Amino acid sequence: MPIGWKLCVLCGARVEYFVAQAPDRQAAIAAVRRRRGMTDATIFVTSDGPCDDLTWLVFADTSKASPDDIAEPGQARPFEGERCTVEGRSIVILESQDS
């Protein structure tokens, strides 16, 4: 049965994060490579195990205007979607939370 794995993808100057549904780590990495066409990317599995029960929150996105750029502790907004694109000269910090 497929489970969710968190992956960090480094492709040139881009850094992207994904959750891939796969039975194991190697299959998750292969799925991201195939789906995104990232044959030259460096891909890390960033979780020690499955992450089906995690919710993602955006703690900081420095491309946003203040006061929307950095959340107060405990006030991070939900991240929607399966992909996070970081604007140039910006930082995005995502945090995971048990569902």
Image (tube, grey):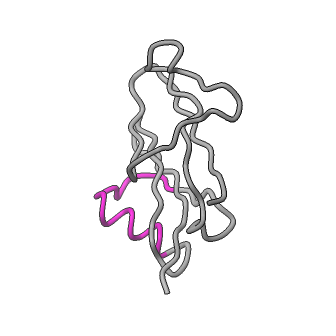
Number of labels in the image equals 0
Residue 79 coordinates in the image, percent (x, y):
47, 44
The answer to if 39 sits in the magenta stretch is yes
Residue 68 coordinates in the image, percent (x, y):
50, 20
**Residue positioned most to the top:** 66
**In this picture, is 93 found above or below 23?**
above
Residue 48 coordinates in the image, percent (x, y):
69, 65
**In this picture, is 98 found above or below 22?**
above
Quadrant of the image containing the C terminus:
bottom right
Q: Which residue is at a point 57% across and 41% down the rendered structure image?
A: 94
Q: Which residue is at a point 63% across and 32% down the rendered structure image?
A: 75
Residue range highlighted in magenta: 27-43
Determine whether, in the image, residue 23 is placed left or right of residue 49: left
Q: Quadrant of residue 16?
A: top left
**In this picture, is 54 found above or below 79?**
below
Q: Which residue is at a point 69% across and 35% down the rendered structure image?
A: 74
Residue 24 coordinates in the image, percent (x, y):
55, 78
Q: Quadrant of residue 65?
A: top left
Q: Which residue is at a point 34% across and 58% down the rendered structure image?
A: 39
**In this picture, is 15 found above or below 38?**
above
